[in-house]
Every structure is written in C-alpha cells, then in structure tokens.
Amino acid sequence: MSAVQELFSILLNGLQLGAIFALLGIGLTIILGTMNFLNLAHGALYLIGAYAGMLTMRVVTLRTGILQDYGFTELGLGWGFLAALVIVPTIGFIVGVLMERYVAKPFYKRPHTDQLLVTFGLALVVEELVKQVIGGNTFQSTSPDTLFGLQVSGPIQLPIVGAFPRWRLIIILIAFIVIGLTWLFMEKTDWGMIVKAGTLDSEMVSLLGIRIGRSYALVFGLGAALAAFAGLIGATFETVRPQIGTQRALVPAFLVLVVGGAGSIRGAIVGGVILGTVLAGFQQTFSQWGQIAMYALVALVLVVRPQGVFGSVEVEE
Amino acid sequence: MSDNGTLLAVEDIDAYYGESHILRGLSLEVQPGEICALLGRNGAGKTTTVRSIAGASPPDVRSGTIRFRGRDVTDVPVDDRSIGGIGLVPEERRVFSNLTVAENLRMAEVSRNRSNLIGRNIGEPAETVDVDVIYEAFPRLDERRDQLAGTLSGGEQQMLAIARALRQGPDLLMLDEPYEGLAPQIVNDVEDAIGRINDEGTTILLIEQNAIAAMAISDRCYVIDQGEVVFEGPSEELEADEEIRQRYLGV
Ligand SMILES: Nc1ncnc2c1ncn2[C@@H]1O[C@H](COP(=O)(O)OP(=O)(O)O)[C@@H](O)[C@H]1O
Ligand SMILES: [Mg+2]
C-alpha cells in the first residue's frame, strides 16, 4: 500500500468511526448543554440500539440467559436493515423520553456527582439486564447484502484507496445523512432554535414564555434516538455483547464531549471525526497505540483549550 | 383588573435561597402606566424581588401572594407568567449569543398562541408586537438582523434584550439594571427607549444603581434594604428625603 493510499483509507475509516462517535457525542452534548445533565447511561442507549437493531434485522440463536432457560432459543424478527432503520431510533426516542421523565428530571438541580451516580447505576442495570435476559455471549455482526435491490456487501474498488468494504461506505453515507438532518433540525426549525438557546441559557428561554420542559423531553428523545441509531449501525460491523455500551459508546462519547466542548453540535461532529480519524490512523499503523493516542489527544485538548474546540464554557465540576 | 386597578401587587412575600432568608415580608404595588423604580444598595434584594415576581427559581417564595391584574399568580410557573404579560429583562442582558438577532426576537414569539393556558389563572396571553414595529423602534437591530447576538456591542445587546422582552407585548416590563456596563451615550439611548416604551402604554418596574437617574425618570420609587421596603412614595418625595437617600442609597 502506498502512503497516499494508506492515508485515504485511514481517512475513510476515520470518517466511519467518526460518524458513530459524532452521533453519540451529539446526544451527550445537547443533553449536557441544555439540561446541564451528565448522562453516563448514554452508552446504554447505544447498547439498546445494538440489540434492538440485531433483533429487528435477523433471528439469533440464544445460548444462555433467562429467555433461553425458558425455552426460547430463537429470538428476533428477521425484518432486515430498513425496518431496523425505522424501528431502532423510534425505540431509542421512546426510551429517551421515559429516561428524561423518570431518571433525569428528578436530578436536574442536583450536583453532577449525583447525576453521574444515578446514570452510572442505570447503565449497569441495563447492561446486567441484557446479560441476564438475552445472555452474556457475543453475537457476530451482520450487514445486509442488498438494500432496495442494490448490492451493499463485498468490496468496492475506489479510486486511490483501492478495495474498500462497500457496506462501510454506505454506513458513512447514512450516518452523515442523519447527522445532516439533525443539523438541519437544529438550525432551521423553531424547536432547534429553542434547544440551541436552551443549551446556552435555559432559564432565559422559560422567561420568554417557552415551556422548556417539553424541549427537554424532545432533546433527550433525540439524543437517545441518535445513540440507538449509532448502536444499530455498530451492530452491522462490530460484534454485539453487553459490554459495548460502556466500551464502544460511553467512553468515545465523553472523549468527543471533551474535544468538541459542552453544548456544541458542531463541536461534537468535528470532535467525533477528529477522534475517529486519530483512532483509525493508529489502528492501521501502530494498532496497539490507537486507544492511547485518543486519550493523549483528549489530554492535549484539556491542557490547551479546556472548554473544547467549539465550547464556550468549561464543564463544571 | 382588580378592584382598584393595580397592575401588580406583591403582598408580604418571604423569599429564600436555600435556607437564607432574603425577602422579609416585602410588599409593593405597581400601577398601570407608571414607571416605578426599585432602589437599594447592592445586595438589598432588588434582583430577588423581580425574580420572585417573574416566577424564576431560585429564589423560593415561601409565603405571601403575588397578584397580577388582580389574579393570584403566586403558583403560576415562570413561562406562564411571561405569557400572561409579566416581562423581565434580567441582569446582564442574557441574549442568546449563539442565535442571530432575528432568532433572538423570534424566541419571544414561538411560545405564543398557546391555547392551553386555561386553568393557569393568568388570563389572556399578552399580544405579541409585530417584529417590524420592533425593528422600527430599534433601527440598529434592524441593520444587524442576521448577525449573531454574541457579536453585538454591549449597548446593542441591551437593546436586543429589551426588544426581545417587548416583542412579547408585556403589560409589565421589569428591567434589572439595564444601564450596567454601558457607555454614557448608550445609557441615554436605552433611557430614551424606556421612555418611549412607557409612553406607548407599557408599565415599567426599573431597577437602577444610579439613584439620581432613576428618580428623574420614574414616577414612584421603592427603596429596599435587607429584603424590606424602607421607603415608598413619589420620586420627588425621595429626592427631598435626604436622610433616606443618605442612609440607604448613599447619595
Ligand atoms: N443565587 C443565590 N444564592 C444565594 N444567595 C443569593 C443568591 N442570589 C443573591 N443572593 C443573596 O441575596 C441577597 C440579595 O441579592 P440580590 O437580590 O441579588 O440583591 P440586589 O439585586 O439588590 O443587588 C444578597 O445578600 C445576595 O448575596
Ligand atoms: Mg441585582
């Protein structure tokens, strides 16, 4: 592989990882910015999305867990990726709205440490529930073969890069379409305007007569839907197991938050792509350094620009 | 309207931040059409008073009654009070710096036409003021419609904060230190704007550090100290009362 080829392939892989990081980061950052709420259960939404996605797309064989104990060895709808594309974000949205109502709301005025404890507890509960009910084993990822009659599996020959998995390219496309739609929603609708204003000064929003509580539910639902969507995508190219919520989602989402700055959607997108590219770059060259490089980058950002690249305020204690 | 036509009546309220007791049995009234000034030293409780009236939290109002247009609004949430015609331009402007001027003004409008105020004891929602009327009154905002509010000068931000509140068509506009940090020339502009707003029928409750300027512009004054009213009366009376001025205002 030539250096240029390598570089472009790193960029593509970086975009793909970055898109998922950005999807996770957007939710976390708008929830923190708007409600000043730190949500460690954000990764659990990714986990829910991954399992819901897997079970919507296909039928899996259970090997352990309560359901299997009761004789359910086959689980899942087998409706394919397009159905999951509709169902999974919807589930995420509903879970997010419920979470806002029953978990987050009572903690809005409490210190961040209390919020961290309750949401971390929730994350553990969700992870454990999945483990107990569906089983603690690892499920292989599956991506669809065709979408709308077009082939989406196998390699595709790209200029410069050469052979690249077609599905990864499609993931990048879909993810950035969703990010773009989120962006449009925030920039072009009154709801988005209210949310943006709320990330800056939620009290002022209510002083203008707006029922900010409804925006809170919407923001939470939206952030959760994006995280679940990220989980669905993740399940098409990574293995699905109960620990992915924390390992594959929560940690990157927080790193994105630190790099991008609290409350900034633009920061989450750019931060996600930067982190994704750094990770992809190291994975491809010095693979064992990938995670460390990501943390090093975050440490660097914290030293040089504690408010994040696009943030205007530092995250309070 | 209540029997005697009082627009706002604050009756014997006690307000707290956590356990610290800030307002102690404070009462005040604002009559329709007047400019009423709320004076007092730093930390006297002026901001706490207007926040209590607006329904912002904290503070926590634990006893007493707040009546607006004769209705008891003590338990009405902050957003509904705003819809009902109680406007507050809080300290430090608080424009949305990440939104454009036009969007900041739009924020004052999106909440309107809310039909679900029934049972909220706030009466008819206040009628919004057309945005063109606002731009006409604040030509400098007009020129900067698409500029991010964060890029405006301090004076322009203050104008925007006032314009945004006005957009809601409040019956009562409370202004918390609107001249703070503004250059003298700009202070005159803001003062003119407040005068015009009042001429057009909006009642004003003004908090002002500069007692002399406040007495000049207002019809009536309240002086508060340590969360209690220590003077109320026509502004001329306060101007004549050297003892009160010396003791509570230092002028
Ligand atoms: N958020 C708060 N928490 C606790 N105490 C506060 C808070 N805001 C104001 N106070 C206290 O309440 C008192 C009145 O403050 P404030 O109403 O802001 O005074 P003023 O506006 O007249 O300068 C002061 O002693 C101040 O220290
Ligand atoms: Mg004050």
Image (cartoon, rainbow, N blue to C red):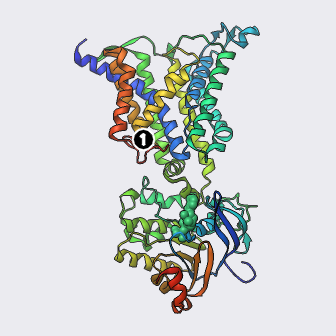
- Where does the image place residue B155, in percent across and percent down from the top left? 38, 69
- Quarter in which the N terminus of chain B is drawn: bottom right
Q: Nearer the viewer, residue A3 or A144?
A: A3
- Where does the image place residue B201, in percent across and percent down from the top left? 57, 80
In the rendered image, is residue A13 in sight?
Answer: no
Residue shown at 60%/20% (left/top)?
A: A51
In the rendered image, is residue A163 in sight?
Answer: yes
Residue shown at 42%/19% (left/top)?
A: A168
Q: Which of B220 and B7 is in front in this view?
A: B220
> Label 1 marks which chain's residue?
A
- Using a 10 Å C-alpha cutoff, classify the residue at mark 1 as few (fewer than 14 neighbours), some (14 to 19) or many (20 or more): many
Residue shown at 58%/75% (left/top)?
A: B225
* Element class at badge 1: loop
- Where does the image place residue A3, in percent across and percent down from the top left? 23, 17
Q: Does the residue labelled 1 lie within 8 Å of ligand 1?
A: no
Specify the amino acid type for callout 1: Gly
> Is residue B141 left or right of B235 when viewed as pictured?
left
Q: In this view, does A272 lie above or below B63?
A: above
Task: Name the residue that disc number 1 marks.
Answer: A261
Q: In this view, does A32 lie above or below B114?
A: above
